[in-house]
Image: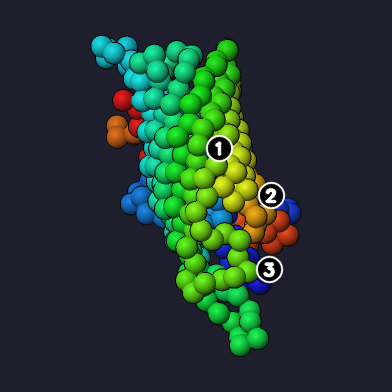
Amino acid sequence: MTTGKQNIQSTRLLGSSAWIGALSALLVAATFLLSMPAAAQLVTGGAAPTADPLDAPVIQEGWDADVRHPPSLDTWSGTAITADARSSFGGAIYAWSGDKTRDGLRIRIEGGTSTYVYETTRTTGVELRQGKAIFASVMLGYQWSHDAWTVKGFLGPAYASHEITPVDLDNDLVGERWGARLSVDVWRNMPYDGFFSLNADLASPFASYAAGARYGVKVIDDLWLGLAAGLYGNRELDAARVGGFLRWRTPYGTLWAEGGVGGDYADLNAPYATVTLAREF
């Protein structure tokens, strides 16, 4: 069942040196997103039922000393797009102590939906399939920080479902699944207000996984540009992506916008884009 599944592979990671020129152009073009509506964004094409953990950034904003109480809640919501898929997702992390600037227990809730299309080849010809996916998880975790490092780990139950129309008997991504999810986020503050982040995610529903990294540098006040790369997959898919991103801190929250190319390891040719708005309360 390899034909047509490549169309679902709409996201992430490294290619050959031929992508270097494209990435340079992407970073230049990313600055123009500041004047555009938050429209287009990444999608896993229903391939990663856990949602894309790379689009749930670890936020290290600190808090305003004039505010009576420090923030205790990080939230994020976003949308993603490729040629073959669309998704919407959101989540929140609550600091049990009531102060997100302190280490301690965390509760993380996430969920989202995705729609996607792909082609299959049969003796009767090429058939178009449409898929709908739902994903959700609730996890308990802990935050630990030391000097420039912050690490968060989470574990908890996860749910995912896929509905394919018309029915595809060769696709294992069908039906409902309950299981467990493990997620780890690592953040390191770098010199000159730069940062490095690493995310890894495993979920038993449909044997899903994802991992990725970002490196960003501050170019002007409240604006960072950088590179992003990742791997993701499940029972039906192993894929990668590579791209560039911007991080823009606004009065309404921190905007993350990412774009690049992704797909099968040997064929990174499917463009993707994602926008996420992160806020703290």
Left/right of residue 143 with respect to residue 17 in the rendered view: left
Left/right of residue 14 with respect to residue 136 in the rendered view: right
Q: Quadrant of the N terminus?
A: bottom right
SS at circle 2: loop
Q: Quadrant of the C terminus?
A: top left
Check disc 1 and report the residue beneath it: 181
- Which colour style is shown? rainbow
Checking the image for residue 145, the label placed there is none
SS at circle 3: loop
- Amino acid at circle 1: Arg
Image vertical order of residue 96 relative to residue 158, above or below: above
Checking the image for residue 14, the label placed there is 2
- Amino acid at circle 2: Leu
Q: Is residue 228 visible?
A: no
Dot placed on the residue nearer the N-terminal end, 3 or 1: 3
Where does the image place residue 152, in percent across and percent down from the top left?
54, 24
